Every structure is written in C-alpha cells, then in structure tokens.
Image: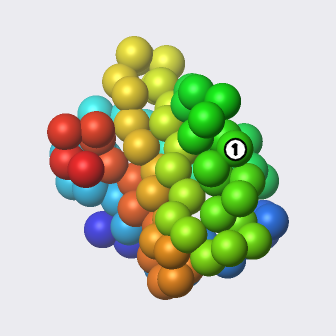
Amino acid sequence: MMLFTETSGRFSPGRLIASEDLLACVAKEELLNAYCHHLNCDWGDVPDSVQQSNDYALSHGEALLSVYTSTGGIRFLIVTEADRSATTLLLPEEY
C-alpha cells in the first residue's frame, strides 16, 4: 500500500510501499517519522557495520536498510532498493 510520495532527503527513495501487517500495528505518523529519518541517513537501530554499509551504498548504488522500533515496541524495517525504484516498510519477518 502506498502511504505518501512527497518527501525530501539525501537520496531518491522511489515509490513508497508499506506492508498491510505493519500498517495494522504501527501508527502511520510513526512510520512517516521513521521514513524521514531513513531519508536523512539516520539508519535507526542498526549496528555500526550496517551504518557503514549504508553510507557506502549511498554513493555506490546499493540497497539501504534501516531498523526502527515503534513506541509500542514493534520493530520494523525500511529498505530502499539498490536502483532507488522503491522503498518498503515492513516487519522483520516479512523481509
């Protein structure tokens, strides 16, 4: 499901997609907040190695991964495809 399309950040995210399961358990406002962090290269709750991989991926056309936790304790991922055609918000078990 598409949530919103107008954004600004440090890279082009492509089409935004969110899983139905994630939308059922995390408020859209929280998802938008995390999405904005992702677009500005705040990768959330990932280890340093993933942060470094994302920083490299920005300039080398590779996929980007962020992990966030909602106020209700639900962990979710944000993944931007290597070709920047789409960014998907989903639960870890959906990845």
Q: How far across and how far down the image is residue 58, in percent?
A: 71, 66
In the displayed structure, would residue 48 be above or below residue 93?
above
Q: How far across and how far down the image is residue 14, in percent?
A: 54, 80
Rendered image quadrant of residue 49: top right
Residue at the location (26% across, 56% down)?
19
Q: How far across and how far down the image is residue 24, in percent?
A: 24, 41
In the displayed structure, would residue 74 be above or below residue 51?
above
Left or right of 70, for residue 53: right
Left or right of 78, for residue 1: left
Rendered image quadrant of residue 45: top right
Image quadrant containing the N terminus = bottom left
In the displayed structure, would residue 13 be above or below residue 27?
below
Q: Answer yes or no: is residue 87 visible.
A: yes
Residue at the location (58% across, 27% down)?
47
Give the residue pinned by disc 1. 52
Residue at the location (38% across, 67% down)?
17
